[in-house]
Amino acid sequence: MRAIVQDAYGSADAMRFDAAVERPVPGADDVLVRVRAAGVDAGVWHLMTGTPYLIRLMGYGLRRPKYRIPGMDLAGTVEAVGANVTRLRPGDEVFGMGKGAFAEYACAPQAKLALKPTSLSFEQAAALPVSGLTALQALRDSGGLRAGQKVLVIGASGGVGSYAVQLAKAYGAEVTGVCGTAKTDLVRSLGADHVIDYTRTEIGAGTGTGAAGGAPDRYDLVLDIAGGRPVARLRRLLTPRGTLVLVGNEAGGRWSGGMGRLLRAVLLSPFVGQRLRPMAAAERYEDLDVLAGFVGDGRLTPALDRTYPLSEAPEAVRSLSEHRVRGKSVVTV
């Protein structure tokens, strides 16, 4: 089969197109998917570079990538199923998370796949799984979001942020999105009630947001997505009983990737009135079905920036690493 392969950690230049890769064989609990599209997210970049180095110790390969074919998010058609698979059958159109999605075929556990919403193209569906699950669980589970609350999404124009804005609105919140100048129109189109351009207003630098355009000064829930602002500064944005959810960190060092900030938040949380919570998404089909429900009633739509053919997947990852993506990018197969 055709696939993108990577034999060493490095930049996007470490990826190469190969037209003669062996097709994977599904295990008893796995599904073989004929991939039609694969999503591009920050996790692909981290596994490409092998940074922070902590992820290598987590089983992804110390000296080189454990999995030669990159890619996690996928959408396609079920080609074959393992002996223990009962929910899915050949011919089903599915989306979810697997291994080696930058290829014509990929395997995924049935527990991480759901039926693709008929209203979505394969490209749109491939943009949904990891980022959509992260946004949903950050708001609903870690954040305890309730209707009527004021929510601040820092990083509102990215993959997770673009879903967080829409989902927070779907749950009945008043939403303020933070992004750069070039992406304010996108965040407004997603339904944000207020948009703050961080290049003009440094949120949390003083006693409040330095609110612009009627944005609140304090929030019941703040999602900091792939940010690096100190927890003390972010706490100034919260109401006395508000919740801060830290969704990743792209400002940390090469060794721990900012885990120190997450740890400080966990240790501080029991001693203050506010809740300070790091989070990591759980990959489960039940929540993919929840996302599909929001898609079905029109309250959630993937914000697609650009699609790339499989042979240009390295360029798609390079564009993501250079912060040139609005919403999500997708590789078509």
Image (cartoon, helix red, strand yellow):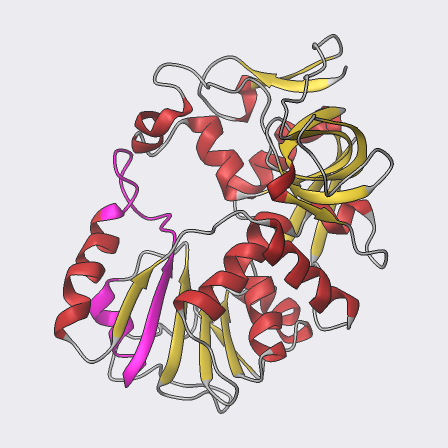
Horizontal side of 245 relative to 233 (left or right) equals right
On the question of residue 326 being in view, the answer is no
Magenta-span inclusion, residue 255 = yes
267 to 78, vertically: above or below: below
In this view, 322 is above or below 213: above
Q: Which residues are magenta?
A: 230-259
Q: In the rendered view, does 311 fall on the left or right side of 156? A: right
Q: Residue at x 78, y 67 (%)?
A: 296
In the picture, which quadrant includes the N terminus?
Answer: top right
Residue 305 % position (x, y) = 70, 52
Quarter of image, res 4: top right
Q: Nearer the viewer, residue 265 or 23?
A: 23
Q: Residue at x 72, y 39 (%)?
A: 86
Residue extending farthest left: 271
> Which quarter of the figure has residue 112?
top right
Any magenta on residue 172?
no
Query: Going 52% across and 61% down the picture, which residue do you hit?
Result: 135
**Residue 224 coordinates in the image, percent (x, y):** 39, 63
